[in-house]
Image: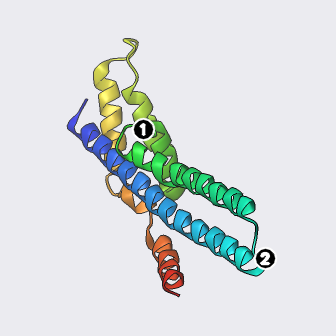
Amino acid sequence: MTENFNILVNKLNAFKRKYYSFRLFKGLVLTIFFLLIVYTGFSAIEYLLYLSSDLRKIIFFGFLVFASLLIGQFIGIPLLKLLNVLKPIDLKSATVLIQKHFTEIEDKLLNIIELSDFKETQYSNEIVLASIDQKIKELKIFNFNDAIQFKNLKIVSIYLIISVFV
């Protein structure tokens, strides 16, 4: 493939890293939030009702199961995909996520990925490479990392930090 295509693939890989970093940070915030809510609820119930020791065991182990499921789903899976232990999204799925944010791209990015997979000898390789290069030049102005914005999560995390200290 051409140098432009390699640059595009590197940009898509950087987008995938930022996407999973975002999912990891979002999962961390959500996990802490839900665990604080459930812990506060269980503590209030125990304080108000003074439950038996068997019921407290059930609540405690239920809380542990709930916490481990939350941590596994919202922190573990994105972390393993970020580290490429689990299979991350492929390039085609990444292009769909980018196209949702940048409507100007339309399906050009997906066409580039599909053309790069095109191996038949029906068309000359030079024509396919020229088509890929032409489409890549149209997409050079886009920074794919802008599709992931941490701004909204920063506001939520500030409220979370405030509630933790209260």
Q: Looking at the image, which residue is at 64% across and 60% down?
A: 60
Q: Nearer the viewer, residue 128 or 80?
A: 80
Q: Looking at the image, which residue is at 66% across and 55% down?
A: 62
Q: Residue 14: horizontal and vertical position, in percent?
A: 32, 50
Amino acid type, mark 2: Leu
Asked if 150 appears above or below 82 in the picture, the reply is below
Q: Nearer the viewer, residue 12 or 152?
A: 152
Mark 2 vs mark 1: in front? 2
Q: Residues within 10 Å of mark 2 (few under 14, many from 20)?
A: few
Q: Residue furthest front?
A: 53
Quadrant in the picture for residue 86? top left
Q: Nearer the viewer, residue 122 or 36?
A: 36
Pick the quarter of the image with the N terminus.
top left
Residue indicated by mark 2: 49
Residue indicated by mark 1: 91
Is 90 placed left or right of 36 in the picture? Answer: left
Quadrant in the picture for residue 56? bottom right
Q: Residue 78: horizontal and vertical position, in percent?
A: 45, 49
Q: Residue 153: horizontal and vertical position, in percent?
A: 49, 71
Callout 2 secondary element: helix
Amino acid type, mark 1: Leu
Quadrant in the picture for residue 84? top left
Asked if 4 appears above or below 75 in the picture, the reply is above
Q: Residues within 10 Å of mark 1 (few under 14, many from 20)?
A: some
Q: CA distance from mark 2 to mark 1?
A: 54 Å
